[in-house]
Image (cartoon, rainbow, N blue to C red):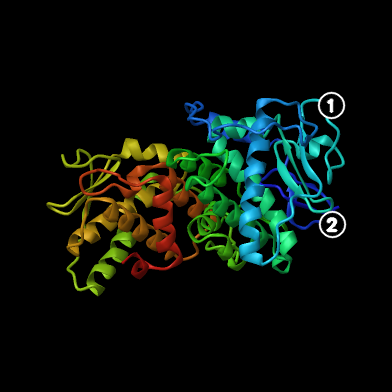
């Protein structure tokens, strides 16, 4: 019995392990409940955006379907994914694509559905989707996975999930076993998912349409469904940064790039430290020293910005602001307490770092307003983050989370943010995987 996937994984839940796995292959129960707890603890479900399907495909070909709206969406997605691979697989691998031999299985884990392939019990798939290599089939939970994804991350997140699972089918057909390295297998599947989503965003899919807002929401699912590399999991999906980085590789570079992803994590495989007190986080000597060295190396003169409490300067807004005259970082402690509590100390450090990055651009006479400035700020923030010694998986994920979710990370000198979450993460990733020189 070989099972590839699942997409949905949350740390610290006991795995239901299947023997004879293809790689990164376990089903985690109660995922939907965990998502609800994570999201519900912070905010109500966001307003629903427009659906991603212009028109849907009937799910009659799906085993176990109830013919409902959930399965119609899933059927539409897998139809477009297979059409994508019918066009792309020959170009990438030189042979025709073959649709899944075993087909697709919809499971109601709240009802009396029969177990799908690679599952001994229907509860094995609770809150999940996975690829079963033994029969070349994909199964999803229509009760506790797809509806929760749709509610909290939008219909596009379902496309990300199912395209990831079909990515495992691509691996099997192409013989890409990644030397049995689970994180690399999962990174490849995320990459293939990203390449498909780009095809949809560009308007090539027959049924699906995804706009930038929907894409940003879908990427948040990659943050929730991840493992910290500090765990002892033998089949890990990687950190939020690992997952988003692989997804963006496919989105930006196409499916040919995916066989080359390494699955190597940027973070150290060490336990996360407890959350630092906010007062400690606001001590910014290390951040200032990093950007001071950068400015000096590039021929500028660094005046370390003083850090003080609100009120800030009139031309900008946010919990952390850079005021140019005199160089000052103004912090709103009450506003910073929110991300410090809900995300973690590194989220606050990331916000502060972005303001020091803006200060560095100012000292170097670089543009400080507009989209390019926003990208430079996010990129330098990523470069500083990755340069920290013994960077833990948890800290890296906190930085990624605030960068995706908050436009404050890329706000320019006028407090404007012209970037999407995807663009911010792409710029952050450039700096993190390269260094400050990669930011231009």
Given the current orientation, which residue lies at the most extreme left position? 325
Residue 367, quarter of the rendered image: bottom left
Q: Is residue 46 above or below residue 245?
A: above
Front in this rendered view, residue 367 or 388: 367
Question: Which badge, 1 or 2, comes first in the chain's sequence?
Answer: 2
Gap between marks 1 and 2 measured at Cα: 27 Å
Residue in view at x 50 percent, y 26 percent: 44
Percent position of residue 246, x then y: 55, 58
For the C terminus, the quadrant is bottom left
Residue 368, quarter of the rendered image: bottom left
Q: Is residue 399 above or below residue 288?
A: above
In this rendering, the count of numbered labels is: 2
Percent position of residue 198, x then y: 51, 50
Left or right of 57? Residue 137 is right
Residue 97, quarter of the rendered image: bottom right
Percent position of residue 393, x then y: 54, 56
Q: Secondary structure at mark 2?
A: loop
**Decide: marks 1, 2 in contact (CB < 8 A)?**
no
Front in this rendered view, residue 432 or 185: 185
Front in this rendered view, residue 23 or 17: 23
Residue in view at x 48 percent, y 38 percent: 214
The residue under label 2 is 20
Q: Secondary structure at mark 1?
A: loop
Q: Is residue 117 above or below residue 142?
A: below
| CA neighbours of label 1 inside 10 A, class few (<14), some (14 to 19), many (20+) | few
Q: Please give the label number shown on residue 112.
A: 1
| CA neighbours of label 2 inside 10 A, class few (<14), some (14 to 19), many (20+) | few
Q: Is residue 390 visible?
A: yes
Q: Is residue 238 visible?
A: no
Percent position of residue 404, x then y: 44, 46
Left or right of 183? Residue 246 is left
């Amino acid at each position: 019995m070989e099972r590839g996937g699942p997409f949905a994984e949350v740390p610290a839940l006991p795995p239901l392990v299947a023997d004879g796995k293809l790689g990164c292959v376990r089903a985690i129960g109660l995922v939907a409940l965990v998502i609800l707890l994570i999201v519900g603890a912070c905010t109500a479900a966001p307003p629903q955006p427009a659906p991603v399907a212009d028109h849907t495909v009937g799910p009659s070909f799906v085993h176990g379907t109830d013919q409902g709206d959930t399965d119609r969406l899933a059927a539409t997605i897998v139809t477009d994914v297979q059409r994508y691979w019918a066009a792309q697989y020959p170009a990438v691998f030189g042979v025709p694509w073959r649709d899944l031999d075993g087909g697709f299985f919809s499971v109601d884990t709240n009802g009396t559905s029969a177990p799908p392939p690679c599952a001994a019990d229907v509860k094995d798939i609770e809150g999940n989707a996975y690829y079963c290599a033994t029969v070349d089939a994909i199964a999803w939970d229509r009760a506790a996975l797809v509806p929760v994804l749709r509610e909290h991350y939008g219909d596009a997140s379902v496309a990300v999930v199912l395209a990831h699972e079909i990515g495992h089918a691509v691996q099997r057909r192409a013989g890409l076993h990644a030397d049995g390295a689970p994180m690399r297998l999962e990174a490849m599947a995320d990459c293939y998912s990203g390449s498909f989503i780009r095809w949809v965003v560009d308007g090539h899919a027959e049924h699906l349409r995804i706009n930038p807002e929907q894409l940003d929401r879908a990427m948040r699912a990659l943050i929730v469904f991840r493992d910290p590399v500090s765990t002892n999991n033998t089949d890990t999906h990687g950190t939020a940064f690992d997952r988003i980085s692989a997804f963006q590789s496919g989105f930006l570079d196409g499916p040919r790039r995916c066989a080359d992803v390494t699955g190597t994590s940027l973070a150290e495989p060490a336990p996360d430290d407890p959350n630092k007190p906010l007062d400690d986080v606001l001590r910014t000597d290390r951040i200032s020293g990093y950007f001071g060295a950068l400015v000096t190396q590039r021929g500028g003169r660094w005046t370390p910005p003083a850090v003080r409490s609100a009120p800030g300067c009139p031309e900008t807004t946010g919990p952390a602001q850079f005021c140019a005259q005199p160089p000052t970082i103004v912090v709103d402690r009450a506003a910073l307490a929110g991300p410090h509590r809900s995300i973690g100390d590194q989220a606050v450090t990331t916000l502060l770092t972005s303001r020091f990055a803006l200060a560095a651009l100012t000292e170097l006479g670089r543009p400080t307003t507009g989209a390019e400035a926003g990208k430079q700020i996010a990129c330098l923030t990523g470069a500083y983050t990755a340069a920290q010694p013994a960077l833990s998986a948890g800290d890296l994920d906190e930085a990624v989370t605030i960068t995706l979710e908050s436009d404050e990370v890329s706000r320019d000198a006028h407090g404007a943010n012209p970037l999407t979450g995807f663009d911010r993460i792409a710029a952050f990733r450039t700096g993190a995987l390269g260094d400050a020189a990669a930011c231009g």
